[in-house]
Image (tube, rainbow, N blue to C red):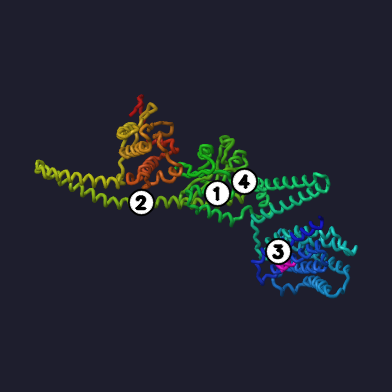
Amino acid sequence: MLEQLGAIGYFIGASGFAFLFVLLLPTYTQKNLPKSLLLLSCLNGFLWAMACGFKIPYGYSILPSLLTETLFNLTVTLLVISTIVNSTHIKSFLQHRLYWLSGTIAVIALLEFCRFFYPLLNQKIFFFLHLIQATIGLWLVESLYRHHHPSSLYQAIKPLCLGLGLLFGYNFAFYADAFLTNTLANTFWQGRGWLITASIPFIALASRRIRRWESRVYISRDIVFHSTLSLAAGLYLLMMSIAGYYIKSVGSDWANVAQTLFFSFSGLLLAGLFFSEPLRKQLKVFITKHFFANKYEYRQEWMTFYTVMKDNQQSPYKRALRAIIGPFGCDCGILVIRQQGTFTVVANINCEPEQANIGWQIESLATPLIDNNWISELDKLAAGEEIPPFPVDRTQIPNESRLPLMIPLSSRDGFQGIFFLSPPRSTNNINWEDRDLMKALSSQIGMYLAMYEANQQLAISKQFDTFNKMSSFLVHDLKNVLTQLQLLNRNAPRHKNNPEFIDDAFETVESATLRLETVLSQFKHKRIEPEESEWFDLTSVIEEACTMRSIQSPIPNFQHDHSQSISLKANRERVKNVINHLLQNAQDATAINGKVSISLKLTAEHFTIVISDTGHGMSESFVSDRLFKPFDSTKGNAGMGLGAYDAKLLVEQMGGSIQVKSRINKGTCFVLSIPINQAASITRDKTWTHC
């Protein structure tokens, strides 16, 4: 059992040297001496570990093991000397006095090679020669450590000193015992394979840190993570094998059954641990903190960021939220952007805005966070651990928030927004590196969304240009109709009693009617021209709109649920048309036996017009992506898709906002909210109005 464990240790060490050799091979150049010696050391280390591993089960001669070990010591010694003397070319290396130390080991290698053919020296002498190799190795490692200790290269050299010091120190004890007893101790021999395996990560880490070697070794976190899992699984199975062997050694009748059940439950436990997502995340955090200089693999993060942002299956806002959530492992988040001075939720993941309870954060913190480009954590802000560059009333901060992490979003073009995220699971404490990555990502997202909105505005402008060009042709058709009717009207006094004229008149009217219907079906929107504002009573305008829509069922029900009437300064006809259009949409979407209602409500800061129906409703994606998009109509040729867009534009021009709440097969509610300062006079009115 112990011999098998020893052989396994050597074979794992050989695999480690082979892996490091393959990792370094693409960076090989003949002009770099340390790199060449490092590659040779890995190759010789592989041969040495394999020779030692095969000796245990097959009982081969010790000479191949000693020879390959001497070759490994020779290349490692040359590598250390080239690092001490800072030599990158063979010429300058040969001129240094330390070079002759490696010549001693080369002579030993020659003697061991000759012993394959003729035994010049006995075995004890070779143990002594290997003891000399270990002594030279320890002296060089100590020189390397002492030479670089005061410099900034110390942190890079330290792993190499630890790895080689471990090997040479063990070999020193091993061969000292062999020289005194004239025999190789099995315990030393069988344990050395695991020491070789343990030293390889230190050599790999040094090869990545020592810039003069120019190896630029890159080991991804995924490889380290899966390697760690494999190593842990191996150690676990090794422990279980030992326990199973002990159970079987008891010798009872139930030993075999107990051993089988033990292995089965052990495998089940191992599988459960491997599939545990919290354990995997904690292991990744542990590896990142203790094995890497940086928390993130920035190349991988940027490639993932690019992949997420180019996905056209979701809206740009949803993509932006996914891109900022991904690197930090947040469970949920919300993106809020500023539109016409009002913050609006445009995307959410695993969290409904109503459930997030971020109203206070938006009202009190969104603007100063954006203005100061400050990333904030609500819990630390409340505890006084975070001192922002703007005043905050800590007594008003909510005790709990589902989305405490706030990342501002802005661009030079004036685009502004803020991400509200749940606590990251990629780290236990957000530090400067996390904040730098958050700022870098938010900066890129801000520019992307600003460009997206600019393109949207440009597309709308182009559509209006096309629409205005089309209007010229339509106006021409209208002039032709007008000419026909003017001619008919001019001839009527002279020919109104002529039956033929009457027939022609009906044909002309019919033709004009058809042409007008064609024009109106293509051009169902007024011309864009400067509007004239006037004072009018908003209540009476809503009543007129309800009267106009009473020709269609269900008839709108207007409820004026307060004792005030409002005078508003705006374009009266446009306001009436907007309300008329929203009522018509509600009627079109509602069955005859359904309900369509409109109400006017007054608060301390706003007055709102609420239009609701019990119709078929709209999906969330339609509301966010298409409802307010001009020239996008679900009515085919019956509409130009400008009504909802015009309603939104009108309300925003008055400094207000429009909100839509809709559920499929439940109904829709439009809420038009306008600041109270847009209303010039508010007078008492005790009556309720219905239509």
**Image-quadrant location for residue 607:** top left
Q: CA distance from mark 1 to mark 2?
A: 33 Å
User: What amino acid does circle 2 point to?
Assistant: Gln
Secondary structure mainly formed by the magenta segment: helix
Q: Secondary structure at mark 2?
A: helix
First in residue order: circle 3 vs circle 1: 3
First in residue order: circle 4 vs circle 3: 3
Q: Are there few (<14), some (14-19), or many (20+) residues within 10 Å of tag 3?
A: some
The one nearer the camera, 442 or 66, is 66
Quadrant where the N terminus lies? bottom right
Q: CA distance from mark 4 to mark 1?
A: 13 Å
Q: CA distance from mark 3 to mark 1?
A: 39 Å
| Circle 1 residue | 324
- Residue 425's disc is 4
User: What amino acid does circle 1 point to?
Assistant: Ile
Residue in view at x 56 percent, y 54 percent: 304
Q: How many numbered tags mark residues here? A: 4
| Circle 2 residue | 463
List x then y, in percent, for residue 20. Answer: 69, 62
First in residue order: circle 3 vs circle 2: 3
What's the magenta region? Answer: 37-44
Q: CA distance from mark 3 to mark 2?
A: 64 Å
The one nearer the camera, 73 or 574, is 73
User: What amino acid does circle 3 point to?
Assistant: Ala
